[in-house]
Amino acid sequence: MTTGTKAFSELRLEGVSRRFGGHDALRDLDLTIEAGEFVALLGPSGCGKSTALNCLAGLLPLTGGSIWQDERRIDTLPPERRGFGMVFQNYALFPHMSVRANVAFGLRMRRLPKDEIRRRTEEAIRLVRLEEHAGKLPGQLSGGQQQRVAIARAVVLEPSLVLMDEPLSNLDAKLRLEMRTEIRRLHQSLGLTTVYVTHDQEEALSLADRLVVLRAGRVQQIGPPQELHTRPANWHVADFMGYRNLWSMRVQAAVDDTVAVERDGFRLVGDPVGPVAPGSEVIAAVRPEDVRVDQAGATTNAVPAEIEVVEYQGRELAAEAVTATGVRVHLRTDRRVAPGDRVTLSMDPQRLLVFPGDSAPAAGPAAGAALLEEPGLVG
C-alpha cells in the first residue's frame, strides 16, 4: 500500500489560535511537520492538544493564524477536502457493518472502482493483521481489535496525514503496549506522517520523533524525546515528563555550571536551567530513578531520610521517603527497603535540575508537586 505522504514536503502551523468565549484554548502555535515525521502533542487535560488536532483536522475553525501544506493554505478548506485520516479515542465504528465494510466505507464514499476498493480494503486489513476477523461485526471484537479496524479505515484512504486523538486510552495496559508497537510499525512501514495526541508521556516518548508539550494553550517546548526527557525547558515540562520531585528553594550561590540551593536546612547542589541568581526563588527537580539509596562514598547531595511508603513494581521498588525537616522524596530502587528504614539518599548534581521559579509548585519543600491541569474547554 502506498500513502499520500508524497503529496507534501511540510505542514506548517503559523500562529494557530482558538478561543472559546474569553478563554484561549490554544494560542500562537507555530509548528512545522516534515513529511514522514511522527509528532506527538503532549500535556495534561485542558492544555490545548486536542484543540490543536481538531483545528488541524478542520473540525474547529481557527480564531487566529493559518495552516499550510507547502504553499497551499488549507485551514480555509472543509475537513473532507484536506485529505487527512482520523483515528478517534472511541473508535467510531459502524456497529452494523462488518470489519471489511467499515474499512471500505470511505473508499465507497469516494466512488472508487469496485476492484480497487476490494484490493485496498483487503490490503489494509492484512496490514493490521485482522484477516481472520474481516467478516465479524465490531461488537464481536476486543478493544484492541476494534482500534486496529479504526486504524485500517484511516490508512486505507492513503492520507497525506494521519491524526490520532488518544487512540489507546480505552485499552488495558497490555493492549496499550501491543498497540503502541503496532502504530509505530505501521507508521514506519507505510511512510505515514502522523500527529498523535496523548497525555501519557511514556507513550509519547516511545512513539514520536518529536514532542510538543503544551500547557494552558501555549507551547512549552518542542524537541526530540531524549531532549525533553533529559533537559526540560522549564519546571512545567519537567513536572509532566516524570520529574516527580519538585521543591521550591532559594539560591545560595551560583558558581560556573553549578548552583547551591536551600530551604529550611534542606541543601542541594544542581545544574541550572536558565538564569538563576543568589537569593532568587527556584524549583529544584530530580527524577525518582535518579535518587540513590545508601550509595557508598556519596557526599554531595547526601540526605538522611526515613522510608514511609513502598510499592512493589517488579525488579524495582517505588518508594517515598521523608527527611527530618519534612521534605518528601520519591525514589525508585532495586534495594530491598521497607517502611521505617532509615537511609541516606543521594542525587547526582548533574541530574538535579534547577529552574527559575516563575511560580511555585507547592507552598514549600514538604509538598510534592502534582500535575498542573489547566482549566479548558477542550483538552
Image (cartoon, rainbow, N blue to C red):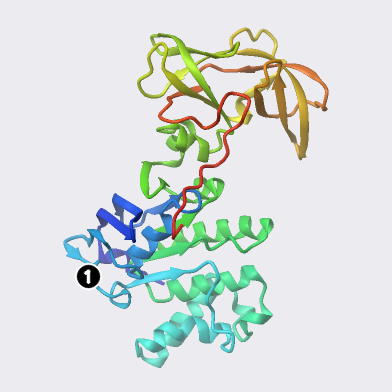
Classed neighbour count for the residue bearing mark 1: other residues with Cα under 10 Å, few (<14), some (14–19), many (≥20): some
Is residue 147 shown to the viewer in this render?
yes
For mark 1, what is the residue? 76
**Numbered label tally:** 1
Q: Tell me where residue 277 appears, x and y as whole percent.
A: 37, 14
10 vs 341, left or right, is left
Decide which of 128, 96 is in the foreground and name it.
96
Q: Position of residue 336 (x, y in %)?
A: 81, 27
The location of residue 5, given as percent across then percent down, is 32, 64
Please give left or right for residue 212 compared with residue 337 in the image.
left
Q: Tell me the residue at 32%/59% (across/down).
A: 19
Residue 200 position, x and y percent, is 55, 50
Which amino acid lies under the numbered mark 1 shown in the image of this protein?
Answer: Thr
Quarter occupied by residue 98? bottom right
- Residue at figure coordinates x 80%, y 26% from the top left: 337
- Residue at x-position 35% and y-position 57%: 36
Q: Is residue 86 above or below residue 168?
A: below
Q: Is residue 351 visible?
A: no
Please report the residue visible at 57 percent of the width from the left and 24 percent of the height from the top.
364
Quadrant showing the N terminus? bottom left
Judged from this view, the residue extending furthest toward the left is 71
Left or right for 76, reference 315: left
223 or 121, nearer to the observer: 223
Instruction: Note whether 148 is above or below 321 in the view shown.
Output: below
Quarter where residue 99 is shown: bottom right
Q: Secondary structure at mark 1?
A: loop
Vertical side of 8 occupied by 306: above or below = above
